Image (spheres, rainbow, N blue to C red):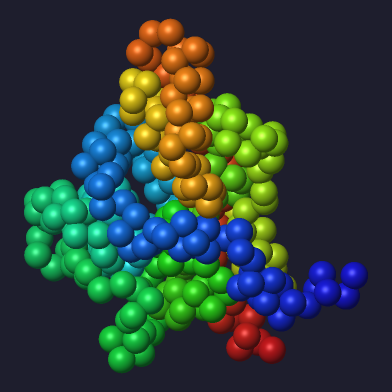
Amino acid sequence: MNDFFNAAVWEKAWKEDSDTGINKMRSAGIDPTRAFDQKAKTFNEQSFSEEGRKRSKRILNWIEGQGIPFENLSVLDIGAATGVFSVPFAERGARVTAIETSLPQVELLETNTAKFAEDQVKIVTEPFENIDVQAEGWGQAFDLVFVSMCPVIHDWDSVEKVLQCAKKFCYLSMPASPHEHSLVKEVWPLVTDRPYQAKQMEFGYLLHLLYLKGYAYESLITRETKTTELSKEAALQEAITWLGHHRLTVDGQKKQLIADYLEQTYPSDKVVIHEGGRFGKVLIRLQDQNMYTREI
C-alpha cells in the first residue's frame, strides 16, 4: 500500500510501461514526429470543419472558464498540427508559439495562420524533445503551455520539461481509455483467435503523479465519438493500419481473412466505422504551486 503514495515507483512504472502510446508507436515502427504526414490534409479538413471548430471551442471555453483570459496571453502550443488550437487562440487575442515537426502539417499551419500579424503566431519546426529550454530562454516564458494529444508527453520527465516552460498554467490532454474502433474490434478475433481486450491508458499516471507532487489542477474526462463510412478497400487498409498500431503484423493470409469478412458482413461497398473513446484534460495552476512552495 505504501507504494501507492511513492512517486518514484509511479515514475518508474510509467517510464517502463511498454503499453504507453509512444512505446506502442515505436514498436510498430512508427516515428511519432512523422505519424501524421500522410493524414495532414484529412486532419486539417476535420479540424476546421464545423464539428472540429465546435470541439476546439468547447476546450478553449473550458480553459477560459477556469479564469484564464486569452487577450495578450503568451501560449506555447506543442504539437500544433495544422493550427487546430493555435488559430482559435490567436483569434481570441493570444500570442502563440506553435511547435510542429510534420512538414506537411507545417505547410498547412503556415497557410492557416497567414492572416495573423507576423508577431502573433511564431512557428517552430524543431522537435520539442530537442529544445534546450533554458538555452532557448523558454524557462517560465509562457503564460500557458498547451499540449493536446501529443506524444511529447510519455513519462514524468517529459511532463517536467513541459512544466519548465510555463509561468502560470499548463494544459495537458491525453487518451483516458484505449481508442475504440469498431472495425478493429470486429476483426481482432480473426487475426488473434481471441477476443479484443482493451488495456488502461497512461492518463492515470499523470493525474496520480500531479497529486503526489502537490500540484493544484482541474481535470475533466469526456467521451467523444465519430462515425465514418469507408469503401471495403479503404476499410481493409484502415484495419491493417490500426492493427499495426497494436503491434499486430497482417500477413497475406490474415489480410485475406479480413477481406473475406468485409465482403460477407458488408454486402454494399459501405463499411460503417464507429470510433472514439474517453479523453482526459488537466489544467495545472503553476501560480498556486509556486505560492505553496514559497509558504513552505
Q: Residue at x 70, y 36 (%)?
A: 194
Residue at the spot x=48%, y=34% of the render?
A: 253
Q: Residue at x 43, y 46 (%)?
A: 59
Which quadrant of the figure contains the N terminus?
Answer: bottom right
Residue 249 in percent (x, y) is at: 49, 47
Q: Where is residue 255 in the image (x, y as percent from the top left)?
A: 45, 33
Asked if residue 219 is positioned above or below residue 139 in the image, the reply reads: above
Up-down relation of residue 213 to residue 19 (above or below): below
Front residue (pair 243, 40)? 243
Is any part of residue 192 visible from this angle?
yes
Location of residue 240 in the rendering, given as x and y in whole percent from the top left corner: 43, 39
**The furthest residue to the right:** 1
Q: In which quarter of the image is the C terminus?
A: bottom right
Q: Which of 220 and 258 is in front in this view?
A: 258
Residue farthest along the bottom direction in this orientation:
135
Q: Nearer the viewer, residue 87 or 95?
A: 87
Drawn side of residue 100 relative to residue 155, left or right: left
Residue lying at the far front of the rendered structure: 253
Above or below for 121 versus 273: below
Using the rendered image of the protein, determine whether residue 72 is visible from the camera's viewpoint: no
Reply above or below: 131 against 276.
below
User: Is 107 displayed left or right of 70 in the figure?
Assistant: left
- Residue 265 appears left or right of 17: left
Tally of numbered discs: 0
Q: In which quarter of the image is residue 33?
A: bottom left
Q: Residue at image x 31%, y 72%?
A: 127
Q: Where is residue 213 in the image (x, y as percent from the top left)?
A: 67, 76
Q: Quadrant of residue 134?
A: bottom left
